[in-house]
Image (cartoon, rainbow, N blue to C red):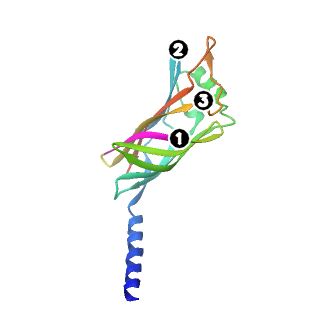
């Protein structure tokens, strides 16, 4: 009986101390970005957002990111061409679906890659996706970089066309998120 009480106290204290290893991640917006690349036989369009929200948790003991949540306004992407950006908002129905969100479900390491599985909510449709990323640490910062493809067809986005030719189905997304810890 005495041993079980001591064991229970030890287990409770251990669990309580372990919870202190999780650190809330704070995004450094100056050094972070999300970027899309949309390809057409005639040219590529690239738009970047530095105005997005991203948070999560980092486990100090394992030195791993354990949770991520990202939200970006569709209107926050800038391609350096206001006409293109207006057309993108129209195509993506930005007033009806103003945000894109991602919530991780699982994060694991495979070799020197971080595999992030989660739910992408884009154009009003939710789909599970897998993102391959790299994690590094520098000067009390956690840095995640990676890329993934988004099928415009699967998210029911009407593909823009130029000269009668539609853009590629895959919207290539790449990112760099820098977190101060």
Outermost residue on the top side: it is 163
Residue that carries the numbered disc 1 in the rendered image: 129
Where disc 1 sits, the SS reads: strand
User: Which of marks 3 and 1 precedes in the sequence?
Assistant: 1
Q: In the picture, residue 123 is in which quadrant?
A: top right
The answer to whether residue 136 is magenta is: yes
Outermost residue on the bottom side: it is 1
User: Which of marks 2 and 3 precedes in the sequence?
Assistant: 2
* Residue 51, above or below 103: above
How far apart marks 3 and 2 lie (CA) works out to 17 Å
Outermost residue on the right side: it is 96
Which numbered tag is attached to residue 41? 2
Residue that carries the numbered disc 3 in the rendered image: 152
Which span of residues is magenta-colored?
A: 129-137
Tell me if 155 is positioned left or right of 46 in this view.
Answer: right
Q: Position of residue 115 (x, y in %)?
A: 43, 44
Q: Examine the residues drawn in magenta and state their main secondary structure.
A: strand
Residue, x 57% and y 25% (percent of image)? 169
User: Which of marks 1 and 2 precedes in the sequence?
Assistant: 2
């Amino acid at each position: 009986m005495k041993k079980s009480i001591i064991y229970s106290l030890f287990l409770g204290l251990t669990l309580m101390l372990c919870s202190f290893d999780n650190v809330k991640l704070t995004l450094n917006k100056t050094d972070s970005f999300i970027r899309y690349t949309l390809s057409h036989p005639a040219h590529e369009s690239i738009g970047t957002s530095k105005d997005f929200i991203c948070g999560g948790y980092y486990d100090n003991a394992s030195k791993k990111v354990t949770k991520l949540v990202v939200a970006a306004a569709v209107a926050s992407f800038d391609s350096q061409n206001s006409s293109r950006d207006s057309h993108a908002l129209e195509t993506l129905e930005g007033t009806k679906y103003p945000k894109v969100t991602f919530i991780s479900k699982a994060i694991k390491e495979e070799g020197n890659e971080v595999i992030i599985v989660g739910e992408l909510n884009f154009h009003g449709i939710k789909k599970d996706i897998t993102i391959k990323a790299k994690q590094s640490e520098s000067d009390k910062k956690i840095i995640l970089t990676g890329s993934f493809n988004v099928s415009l067809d699967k998210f029911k986005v009407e593909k823009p066309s130029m000269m009668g030719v539609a853009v590629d189905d895959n919207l290539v997304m790449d990112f760099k998120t820098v977190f101060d810890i």
